[in-house]
Amino acid sequence: MANEGKVRITQTSSPPTYCRRYNGAGYDDYDAELDDLSGAGTDLWGAANHILYWGYSAKQYSLGARILTAPVTGALTWEYSTGAAAWTAFTPFYDGTNSLTDTGFMAWSNPPAATAWASHTHTGALPDAYWIRASIASHTTTGVFLNFLRTINVLNEPLTLKPTFPPLNVTDINQALQSRDLVYAGPNALTLRCVYKAVRDANGNGMPMLNLLHYWHANRSTLYIEDLAQNSTTNLVSEGLYKNYTGRLDAIEGDVHSPHKMHTSGFTLRFVLSASTAVME
């Protein structure tokens, strides 16, 4: 299994305030699915006349999506609200979702003109918000999304820790023997013990990754933590059980400022959690 022994950490921020799908006759309420971490997924467009809407209580310029099944549709048209029932087309300047067929992140500039993008209720059918929407030219198959969390991949790529598999005991900076493991001490605490070389990038350099950890810690960034396959009660080779966590990095313990000392020494990341969910993949 490709996920053996990996923990992936991604910086996120809040999802849109509202999400609706026009189904040809009325509006499906997708608010609960905006930040869902564990569900079976929710349909995107189910027909050519369906339209997806995202509403923001204050103007924001990004949208993320975790896509479980890619839709097959005609071209997307993006529009922003200009008041009442008026809409103006726009094109995202960055679209890492490939028109909502891939998990990723999209962003648009300001404009959609700050003076033109208006908060409204769409003649009372929607909550009062700054809305964008996506319609499709045609529909072949229905896609499925898990959530619309805005992962900040444009600024900070996800950090994937790749400790030695199977888990090994390591010596910390105090020469104490520690198990390299991810320990959930719920409902609020998560501890990740690993070795320095677990955070090396593709070129074998650990400092950019360690700097990213310190950036997340200093800025109290909201993080999405995926335990891709580390559970002592699970057969890691044959099963895909893992857990998702949302929280922030509360402490970095260990001599991570001196990476040349950390090739066999352990350090610890401590997280304060706001949510955790078991997932089968």
Image: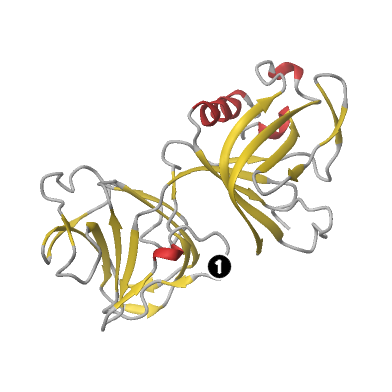
Query: In the figure, 118 relative to 167: above or below?
Result: below
The N terminus is located in which quarter? bottom right
Residue at horizontal 40 percent and vertical 56 percent from the top: 97
Q: Quadrant of residue 241?
A: bottom right
In this rendering, position of residue 224 left or right of residue 166: left
168 and 193: which is toward the camera? 193
**Where in the figure is residue 199, as x and y percent of width and height?**
66, 33
In this rendering, position of residue 82 left or right of residue 281: left
**Where in the figure is residue 164, as x and y percent of width and height?**
79, 39
In this rendering, position of residue 270 left or right of residue 79: right
**Where in the figure is residue 235, as x and y percent of width and height?**
83, 60
Query: In the figure, 93 relative to 203: above or below?
Result: below
Q: How many marks?
A: 1
Query: In the figure, 40 relative to 242: above or below?
Result: below
Residue 94 visible in the displayed image: no
Residue at horizontal 78 percent and vertical 41 percent from the top: 181
**Where in the figure is residue 27, as x and y percent of width and height?**
30, 76
Colour convention of the picture: secondary structure
Query: In the figure, 250 relative to 181: above or below?
Result: above
Looking at the rendered structure, the secondary structure element under dot 1 is loop
Q: Which amino acid does label 1 sit on?
A: Gly
- In the orientation shown, which residue stands out farthest toward the front? 187
Q: In which quarter of the image is residue 38?
A: bottom right
Q: Quadrant of residue 55?
A: bottom left
Residue at horizontal 52 percent and vertical 31 percent from the top: 216
208 and 12: which is toward the camera? 12
Check disc 1: other Cα within 10 Å, few if <14, some if 14-19, many if 20+.
few
List the residue tagged with mark 1.
39
The C terminus is located in which quarter? bottom right
- In the orientation shown, which residue stands out farthest toward the bottom? 25
Residue 57 visible in the displayed image: yes
Residue at horizontal 18 percent and vertical 48 percent from the top: 112
